């Protein structure tokens, strides 16, 4: 790979853009303490806004009730073709994360010794300037190889943003444990098995399991037999795939479950599948 010619001026401008994006997205909490929960507004006209839950990879449709500019309630969207109004407890609790008083919304800089847990608020401009200065110093000394980037996995993995940043940086290293050990091996093996990718119930509400009538275009092929290897949609996809697999089995779909645990997806003695719990 040819090294990208990058100047300090262009790098600082790129960092400022990244800072603006981070400001809109929020940040993780650090200096935690016991405080009273934030109270939502109780007056004014209420508005319903359709959106998507991102508490996990299933992307269930939800309706946010907004009053005086604040979300006061979340519920499943009955018009969504995947979850059809169902929503799990984690998704409905998203309002608690949104207004958690310990959620950090601006940069914090350590002002004491490491481990003292003393911080001060600084501007996004100062944060980007200080970070880019240190990164540029090491870039000048060691080149792009000095940088290792990582990103969060779990319910909201970011596989593409670090790669785009490293292409501008001119190289470097990228590591994301959930992606390297879980998603990528499984995703790439799909090509070897059936020529497709990203069709696992562990990764989201894949359309292959939906009967005709679930999707607007009504073109899905009915699934006759489904092999579930180490996945538990009754637990991680309650509102979408967990519910759909139950309905498909009730309509005659056969399942083969390979799992060290006895899950609701693997009933004994040919008994009907246990319906996945839903919250509305």
Image: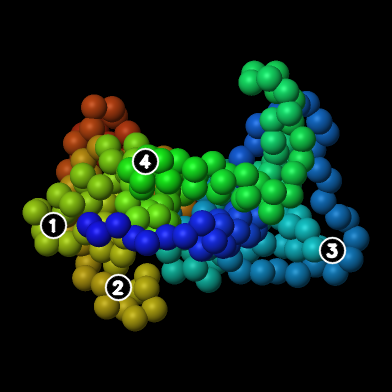
Q: Distance from label 1 to label 3 (Cα)?
A: 49 Å
Sequence-earlier tag: 3 or 4 = 3
Mark 3 Cα shell of 10 Å, populated few (<14), some (14-19), many (≥20): some
Sequence-earlier tag: 3 or 2 = 3
Q: Distance from label 3 to label 2 (Cα)?
A: 41 Å
Where disc 2 sits, the SS reads loop
Give me the disc on residue 142: 4
Sequence-earlier tag: 2 or 4 = 4
Q: Quadrant of the N terminus?
A: bottom left
- Residue receiving disc 2: 212
Residue at left offset 34%, top offset 60%: 4
Q: Distance from label 3 to label 4 (Cα)?
A: 52 Å
Where disc 1 sits, the SS reads helix
Q: Position of residue 9 (x, y in %)?
A: 54, 61
Q: Are marks 4 and 1 in contact (CB under 8 Å)?
A: no
Give me the disc on residue 191: 1
Q: Nearer the viewer, mark 4 or mark 1?
A: 4
Nearest the viewer among 122 and 59 is 122
**Within the image, what quadrant is residue 208 found in?**
bottom left
Give me the disc on residue 68: 3
Sequence-earlier tag: 4 or 1 = 4
Residue at left offset 69%, top offset 30%: 110
Residue at left offset 74%, top offset 57%: 71
Q: Left or right: 233 with respect to 79?
A: left
Q: Position of residue 77 (x, y in %)?
A: 56, 64
């Amino acid at each position: 790979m040819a090294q990208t010619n990058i100047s300090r001026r262009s790098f600082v401008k790129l960092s400022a853009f990244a800072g603006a994006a981070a400001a809109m997205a929020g940040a993780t909490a650090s200096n935690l303490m016991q405080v009273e929960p934030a109270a939502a507004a109780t007056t004014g006209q209420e508005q319903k806004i359709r959106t998507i839950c991102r508490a996990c990879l299933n992307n269930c449709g939800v309706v946010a009730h907004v009053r005086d500019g604040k979300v006061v309630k979340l519920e499943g969207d009955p018009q969504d073709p995947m979850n059809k109004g169902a929503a799990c407890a984690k998704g409905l609790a998203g309002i608690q994360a949104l207004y958690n008083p310990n959620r950090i919304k601006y940069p914090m800089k350590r002002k004491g010794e490491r481990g003292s847990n003393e911080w001060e608020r600084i501007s996004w401009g100062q944060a980007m300037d200080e970070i880019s200065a240190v990164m540029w110093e090491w870039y000048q000394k060691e080149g792009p190889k000095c940088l290792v980037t990582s990103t969060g996995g779990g319910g909201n993995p970011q596989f593409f943003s670090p790669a785009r940043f490293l292409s501008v940086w001119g190289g470097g290293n990228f590591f994301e444990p959930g992606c390297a050990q879980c998603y990528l091996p499984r995703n790439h093996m799909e090509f070897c098995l059936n020529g497709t990718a990203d069709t696992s119930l562990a990764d989201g509400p894949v359309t292959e399991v939906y009967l005709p009538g679930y999707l607007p275009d009504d073109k899905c092929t009915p699934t006759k037999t489904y092999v579930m290897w180490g996945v538990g949609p009754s637990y991680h996809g309650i509102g979408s795939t967990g519910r759909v697999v139950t309905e498909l089995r009730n309509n005659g779909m056969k399942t083969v479950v390979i799992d060290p645990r006895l899950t609701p997806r693997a009933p004994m003695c040919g008994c009907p599948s246990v319906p996945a719990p839903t919250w509305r």
